[in-house]
Amino acid sequence: MKPPATWPGGKPRPPRPQNVLPREVRLIGGQWKRSKLPVADRPGLRPTPDRVRETLFNWLGQDLSGWRVLDAFAGSGALGFEAASRGAAETLLLERDPALVASLDASRQRLGATALRVQRSDALSWMGSADPARWDLVLLDPPFDAALAQPAVALATPLLAEGGLLYLETGEAPPEALPGLEPWRHLRAGAVHASLWRRVSAA
């Protein structure tokens, strides 16, 4: 039933806020299932929706034991912490906002996430000088309005081990093809396009 436009007594009902971000996100799987991560009010910060995170880790599988995971635009840390919660051997969160870095590190300490590291870095600069073929999974969720998806993919692809996976979250449909990658999965949830790609052999 649609709520009335006025409160009892005829007073106008205040409008519902639009596009209000949650103040926290809840991890949905693994050893820290139901643990909460704070979401700061920062420009461009937009945590991956629960439905999309759940689908992504259904695609990946619930056990990431032994995986090496790079979360290049960490933000709230929801994606990286989900990977670590599922047993990833190494998870590196990159974030350039010092307030978010402090929040991520506080969550790391609170959860005792010893296999997870937080580093204050610009994602593109860091990926441009990183060792190649090292990561099993790279998570890319850049701000939608910053035009970072294409350069981030180009820099992230060489960092993947052969057969490694790249997750890309954007506000528009992903391209049909990306150099060095083959498409594996795609989901659209509202304004979010989530796609998973696999690194192919250079031969």
Image: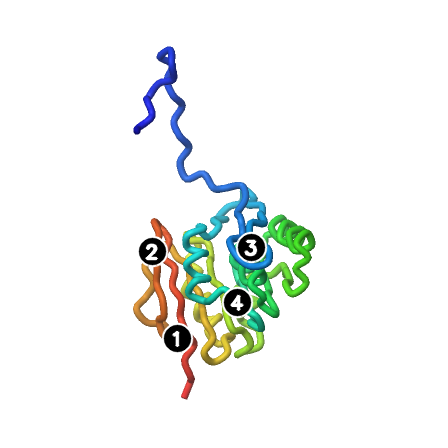
Question: Is tag 1's residue or tag 2's residue first in the polypeptide sequence?
Answer: 1
Mark 3 lies on residue: 77
Question: Is tag 3's residue or tag 1's residue first in the polypeptide sequence?
Answer: 3
Where disc 2 sits, the SS reads strand
Where disc 3 sits, the SS reads loop
Taking depth in this image into account, of 137 and 40 the one nearest to the observer is 137
Q: Residues within 10 Å of mark 2 (few under 14, many from 20)?
A: some
Mark 4 lies on residue: 63
Question: Is tag 3's residue or tag 4's residue first in the polypeptide sequence?
Answer: 4
Give yes or no for contact between labels 2 and 3 (Cβ–Cβ under 8 Å).
no
**Can you tell which of label 1 and label 4 is closer to the viewer?**
4
Amino acid type for the residue under numbered disc 2: Arg
**Cα distance between the residues tagged 3 and 1:** 25 Å
- The dot on residue 181 is 1
Give yes or no for contact between labels 1 and 4 (Cβ–Cβ under 8 Å).
no
Q: Residues within 10 Å of mark 1 (few under 14, many from 20)?
A: many
Where disc 1 sits, the SS reads strand
Q: Residue at x 33, y 21 (%)?
A: 5
Give yes or no for contact between labels 3 and 4 (Cβ–Cβ under 8 Å).
no
Amino acid type for the residue under numbered disc 1: Leu
Amino acid type for the residue under numbered disc 4: Asp
Amino acid type for the residue under numbered disc 3: Gly
Choose top left, top right, bottom left or bottom right for residue 119. bottom right
